[in-house]
Image (cartoon, grey):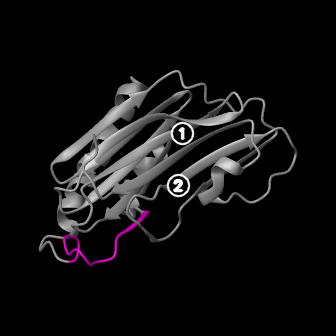
Amino acid sequence: MKKKILSLLLGAIFAISTCSCSSQNPNNTDIQSPNSQMYIKPSVFSEETQQILELLDEEITFFDIVLNDNVKSYAISLWIFNDGKWSEQGKILGDNSADAHRIAAKITGDTCVLYSIDENGHSKCTYRDLNISFEESLGIISSKIHSETFIELDTEIPVWVKIGNDENHLESLDLDNFKNAKCNAGFAITFTAYSEAAT
């Protein structure tokens, strides 16, 4: 029953997100100009929506994206640290046909769900049995982009990284260089805007 209620709450969040995307840029200005700035930033919700998110009690995060006409496609990627190395475990692709975009990632135990949201609705990919475990980590640090971050074509941007290591202290986490961080467990969500259509 609890799982069903949480699913309904999450569905309400995505309905709100879809409406929000459709109203972000009704006149289609700036976003589709080839020379306009492109950026990704954390989504801002109303107090009521934020309360619903807190009820979910899950690790979920949303980001708003502004692209221009130079972008033909984009990708949201999931990276996992296993067996001493980082590897890409999943990817969801999108095109630039919508006026506004929002992405989301939800981590629950060893399962990750990636979402791509626009005014037409949302799509998702679920990845299970990922062996995301911080049980053997003495220190854990999580970091997300916290402000507007400019997007460069064909450049991967880490937007959410969580790592753990077997030491009692952790140095500050450099998002852009997360693959060089000393860790024994971790996951990362990245965003890439492509100048060509993704295949």
Snapshot quadrant of residue 22: bottom left
Q: How crowded is mark 2: few (under 14 residues within 10 Å), some or many (20 or more)?
A: many
Residue 167 as seen in the image, left or right of residue 140:
right
Q: What residue type is disc 2 on?
A: Pro
Which residue is nearer to you in this view: 134 or 11? 134
Residue position marked by numbered label 2 in the rendering: 158
Count all numbered tags in the image, as a single digit.
2
Position in image of residue 59 (x %, y %): 52, 42
Callout 1 touching callout 2 (CB < 8 Å): no
Element under disc 2: strand
Snapshot quadrant of residue 20: bottom left
Q: Measuring 75% from the left and 41% from the top, which residue is drawn there?
A: 183
In which quadrant is the N terminus drawn? Answer: top left
Q: Measuring 40% from the left and 54% from the top, which residue is drawn there?
A: 192
Position in image of residue 140 (x %, y %): 73, 45
Q: Is residue 37 magenta?
A: yes
Residue 159 as seen in the image, left or right of residue 195:
right
Q: Is residue 58 visible?
A: no
* Boundaries of the magenta span: 30-41
Residue 25, above or below 164: below
Q: Residue 89 carries which label?
A: none
Cα gap from disc 1 to disc 2, whole angstroms:
10 Å
Q: Which mark is residue 79?
A: 1
Q: What residue type is disc 1 on?
A: Trp
Q: Measuring 32% from the left and 47% from the top, which residue is drawn there?
A: 13
Residue 39, above or below 144: below
